[in-house]
Image: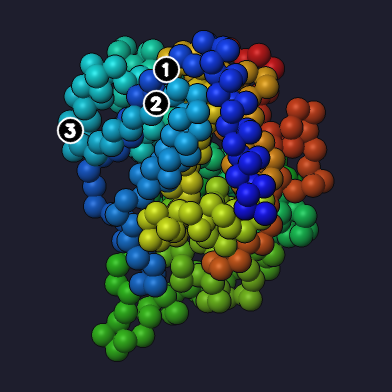
Amino acid sequence: MTNSRNLICGILSFIFATILCANPVLAAEVEVNIAYLGIEEEPHIPLSLVELPVEDNGVRGAELALKDNITTGSFLGHKYDLKVAHPESAHLRDTFLNSLNENIRIFIVDLPIKELLEISQLPEAKASLLFNIRAPDDELRNDLCQANTLHILPSRAMLADALAQYLAWKRWYKWILISGQTSVDQAFAKAVRRSAKRFGAKIIDDITWEFKPGARRTDSGHVTEQQVIPSATQTRDYDFAIVADEADHFGEYLSYRTFRPRPVGGTQGLVPTSWHRSHEQWGGTQLQRRFKKLADRDMTPRDYSAWVAMRAIGEAVVKANSGDSSEIRAALFDPNYKLAAFKGVPLTFRTWNGQLRQPILVSGPKALITVSPQRQFLHERSPLDTLGYDLPDSLCQEFSSIE
């Protein structure tokens, strides 16, 4: 059996080498220079003491995909180089410009919206290609969109729609919404309100969480949320409680403590996400194991987005046989471009705002519950376009749609 396998591998290698020698265009060496750009910051400390802080969030996903790109590139004469930079926020612009001086035009960008816009709107960045793996803000896909920026992670609207579709399938149409006071909490709450209108749900009570975060226990040792949550959620009957707590100040405390015995979801509880450690379908287990071997921890959604960004670059380089950012961008929007990413369907980019189409996992803490879009939600172009801002809704003026 081993000898037969070796023989087959030898024959395939000979055929591939023959093709390369016969086609000098394929055999030409292509250099692909990529920068991973973040900012220096302390890792997020989870509210739950069970979860450990992640100090290398995102970078490890890019490194895993880089290995895949290098493996494929070794047969095609494609060479990849990844430079990782996490400057202080004040030095972000200079770091970006220095990368341009080093002939880097492709960036995996691990930045919040403010910092992302700071570099994407620079005149010098016009010919660059930025892959956003961190900022879920809907504005970046609409009135603040930039032609040089593609969005790998789902927008908040996509996440809210994914959860709303499942709740509609369950016929849970009466919601309460419990939102934190931070800007990111309010942004997700806004996306939830939009989803409620889209899918026929009614938010019967819109609650702002005013309990001060940080004091986990009283002097007596009792969790103070046990006393606050029942009174805060004592309202008319409802089917589902949606929490908007991206800042992670209170959401973990809500499950099993609401006044009525109702399920909780949103940013905590039943969570819509691009990736989850419980995902096993469509070869997901393989990716999970490879990542854990590399990083000695579970893959996070940001790791997954970085992995997808790097793989998207690799597939576009193969298609264009070029490391030039403009040719890679053209390949990414080619109607025949498809990216395999352990989601059961090929992923493609929306031509009107640069958002990557993808299924959204809807998961509990330890088990995958469902995957959206739900089957009953159809679309003339793709069921994936039932998630987030569709072409008729788009306010983006920077992209020239070819749909």
Q: CA distance from mark 3 to mark 1?
A: 37 Å
Quarter holding the N terminus is bottom right
Discs 3/1, front: 1
Question: Which secondary structure, mark 1?
Answer: loop
Q: Where is residue 101 shown, x and y percent of the image?
A: 23, 16
Q: Which badge, 3 or 2, is on the more N-terminal residue? A: 2
Disc 3 designates what residue?
Answer: 90
Q: Are marks 2 and 1 in contact (CB under 8 Å)?
A: yes
Q: Which mark is residue 79?
A: 2
Residue nearest the viewer, comparing 278 with 192: 278
Mark 1, residues whose alpha carbon is within 10 Å: few (<14), some, or many (≥20)?
some
Mark 3, residues whose alpha carbon is within 10 Å: few (<14), some, or many (≥20)?
few
Q: CA distance from mark 2 to mark 1?
A: 7 Å
Disc 1 designates what residue?
Answer: 29
Question: Which secondary structure, mark 3?
Answer: helix
Amino acid type shown at disc 3? Ala
Q: Are marks 3 and 1 in contact (CB under 8 Å)?
A: no
Question: Which secondary structure, mark 2?
Answer: strand
Residue nearest the viewer, comparing 351 with 207: 351
